[in-house]
Image (cartoon, rainbow, N blue to C red):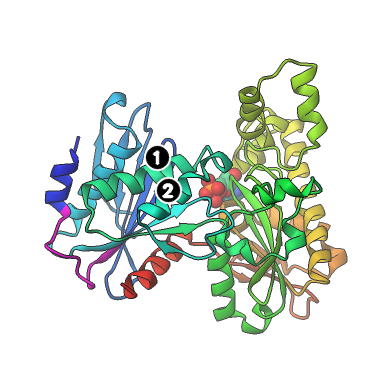
Amino acid sequence: MSSPETVTQAVAPAKVSPDGCVAVVNAGSSSVKFAIYEPDARQDVRYHGKIEGIGTAPRLKVERPDGETVSERSWRAEALDVQAATLEVLRTAADLIRGSPIAGIGHRVVHGGTDFAAPIRVDDAVVAALKRLIPLAPLHQPFNLAAIEAIAQAAPHIPQVACFDTAFHRSQPALAQLFGLPRKFAEEGVRRYGFHGLSYEYIAGRLAETAPELARGRVIAAHLGNGASLCAMKGGRCVATTMGFTAVDGLLMGTRCGTLDPGVVLYLMDEKGLSVRDVEDLVYRRSGLLGVSGVSSDMRGLRASPEPAAAEAIALFVYRVVREAGSLAAALGGLDGLVFTAGIGENDPQTRAEIAAGCAWLGLELDETRNARGSGRVSRDGSPVEVWVIPTNEEAMIARHAAAVLATI
Ligand code: ADP
């Protein structure tokens, strides 16, 4: 295991070179994912890696973009917590790019609250402000910050940039952020924030490059992965989104229930004796596709299953997307395009077809051949609403943000 001192020796040039590589770190409760981007063409990735199984069986794997594995290692469970894993990542990165220093590190940080509407260079004051948001995202924010603090301690000369999943949604009108609760709660931060913002920002950028006219219009982006949400964009800016105060709201997801009558939570606690932690476990980890099907949280697993409950879980997933798409189309005052992205959105033509069929009344007309091929525009020529498949890349978005902030230092 690396101590902070050995990491400092490994990565520390006398001062940070503006020509160094940009690293991206995405730290969670049981994994630290990372990537290293080229110094010049900052969008070209050199390596992807992750340490998975933190707390159980930590193992590192690093690959080149072509899939060739360049490094593998494992540890005993007690050897690595998230901070130690982050230092291992840093040391591994320094080994891999020996000769070209790390110019800076971009982090995915799930919650920026109401204050952080753009990526920001991290200092002590920023960390303190982000720590105050931990109660709003207890499952993610502490680990994002643990990684930042580990690096700040071990390699204080490396600039770090926090990039927020909430930031893209700060453009939502005030009404779209309000719950129907007494006003004081909104003032205390109980409001609809929205997540998956780095993905939507990337999609908005790609759409502006590939279909500029559509990008200026009214578009719903559908990020359908294990986590799933929709985002309504007008001219590339968010006006509404299905996730709210937390990332459990909105669509049915792999293991999250999505929108739920709060009366259900009261009933479960009052009548069934569930504790707060029980409810948390239920709505985040035991619900969604997994809970409804009793088979799997994974769309591929459900598609392959003969169980009627698996088919019903998929049907509910599609139904929820279609209903929420209607709601977002209302918020947009009409619809010009829909973009599918993330694991299911990019790879599952059948789910795309079922969602498009449910949204036919809005004017979506898929082209079967294009949908089966699954990239670029998949709607028929002349379809009143264009349908696109655009692979997302949150990591590249973070690298770009980090590079832009570093350029100002
Ligand atoms: P995460 O939110 O964890 O990043 P992903 O974006 O990787 O998740 O999406 C994972 C989901 O994508 C899983 O439900 C998986 O089954 C689904 N998926 C991936 N490839 C396919 C495919 N070829 N067909 C259907 N579903 C797929």
Residue 43 shows up from this direction:
no
SS class, disc 2:
helix
Picture residue at 80% right of the left edge, 29% below the top: 264
* Dot 2 crowding, Cα within 10 Å, few <14, some 14–19, many 20+: few
Picture residue at 22% right of the left edge, 68% below the top: 20
In the image: residue 88, left or right of residue 65: left
Span of residues in magenta: 11-22
Q: Which residue type does callout 2 highlight?
A: Ala
- On the image, the x and y values in percent for residue 165 come to 54, 56
Q: Disc number at residue 31?
A: 1
In the image: residue 3, left or right of residue 366: left
Q: Residue furthest front?
A: 184
311 or 390: nearer the viewer: 390
- On the image, the x and y values in percent for residue 271 come to 80, 16
Relative height, residue 99 to residue 409 (above, below): above
- Quadrant for residue 282, please give it: top right
Q: Disc number at residue 128?
A: 2
- Quadrant for residue 249, please give it: top right
